[in-house]
Image: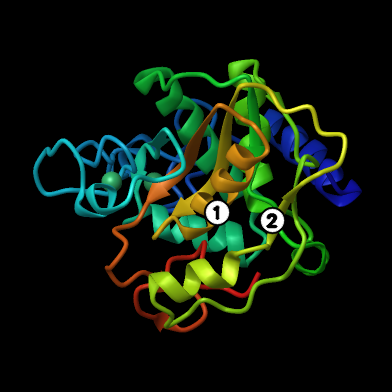
Amino acid sequence: MKEGTAVDGLAARALRLVLPPRCLLCGAVGADGRDLCAGCAGDFALNAVCCPRCALPLQAPAPLCGECLKQEPPFASAWTPFRYEHPLDLLEARFKFRADLAAGRVLSALMIKRAAADAPMLPELLIPVPLHTARLRERGYNQALELAEPLARALAISLRADWLLRTRATPPQTGLDAKTRRRNLRGAFAVAAGATLPEHVALVDDVMTTGATLRECARVLRAAGVARVDVWALARAPGRSAVPSPASGRRGPEGPDEGTPE
Ligand SMILES: [Zn+2]
Ligand SMILES: [Zn+2]
């Protein structure tokens, strides 16, 4: 974590002593010591009805979605407690594109709260989806790691952000079909030399859209000998629906995980 973030964290804690937390969405007094009020917290849509395998939001319960029937994903299960809808999209955009780490803390707290309620099967290790170093330098933080760290602490699971590497920057995925997207991601990830991966790993990302990135990461971990890979993401967007982007308004089928240059 950068020094600036630690200093900001201290300042935020000091301010907490004198000022009550404020809802980042509406400005009302925050609930449970968080920067989110109870009313706004109730507006987050749970991804309750979804494919049991890949967590794709469904209209009605089904044993598997069409995609999973066509091709079995390389991961064993997907846990994505929320749907990528309003108002989660607002906080996610602030977190991911405007370096608003307070929004990130609220999102990670929501994820931790859902972990207690949903009780997903716990892995031995959490691995955040890595950013390419050039991208990391530009942004200053990896949003997947920012979510994974508090989660690992809360659930007492080990976390390694240096065992899965993004070895190649991938071109922007906007406007590409799933097959092209998959091809672009081939060879983009590698397991670090000397990594001692356990039997059961969960990958962590912020938003899962088509899941192309998470699938490729899972494939690489499986190829490296991990027996079971699960994927965890804060929110799931329907793969084919338009997902708003903070930069260009509505932009088509890409979500924030795959629609931006990495
Ligand atoms: Zn509010
Ligand atoms: Zn599915």
Say the numbered circle drawn on residue 216: 1
Whole-percent x, y for residue 32 in the image: 48, 25
Q: Which residue is drawn at 43% across and 18% down?
A: 116
| Horizontal relation, residue 184 to residue 14: left or right | left
Q: Which amino acid does label 2 sit on?
A: Phe
Whole-percent x, y for residue 8 in the image: 80, 46
Whole-percent x, y for residue 140 in the image: 79, 60
Instruction: Name the quadrant of the N terminus.
Output: top right
Q: Do the residues labelled 1 and 2 touch (CB within 8 Å)?
A: yes
Say the numbered circle drawn on residue 189: 2
Instruction: Name the quadrant of the C terminus.
Output: bottom right
Q: Which of marks 1 and 2 is nearer the N terminus?
A: 2
Q: Quadrant of residue 218 in the image?
A: top right
Q: Residue at x 67, y 43 (%)?
A: 146
Q: Residue at x 44, y 24 (%)?
A: 115
Q: What residue type is labelled 1?
A: Glu
Q: Quadrant of residue 98 in the image?
A: bottom right
Q: Which residue is drawn at 57% across and 41% down?
A: 204
| Horizontal relation, residue 69 to residue 129: left or right | left
Image color mode: rainbow
Q: Quadrant of residue 131 in the image?
A: bottom right
Nearer to the camera, 152 or 18: 152
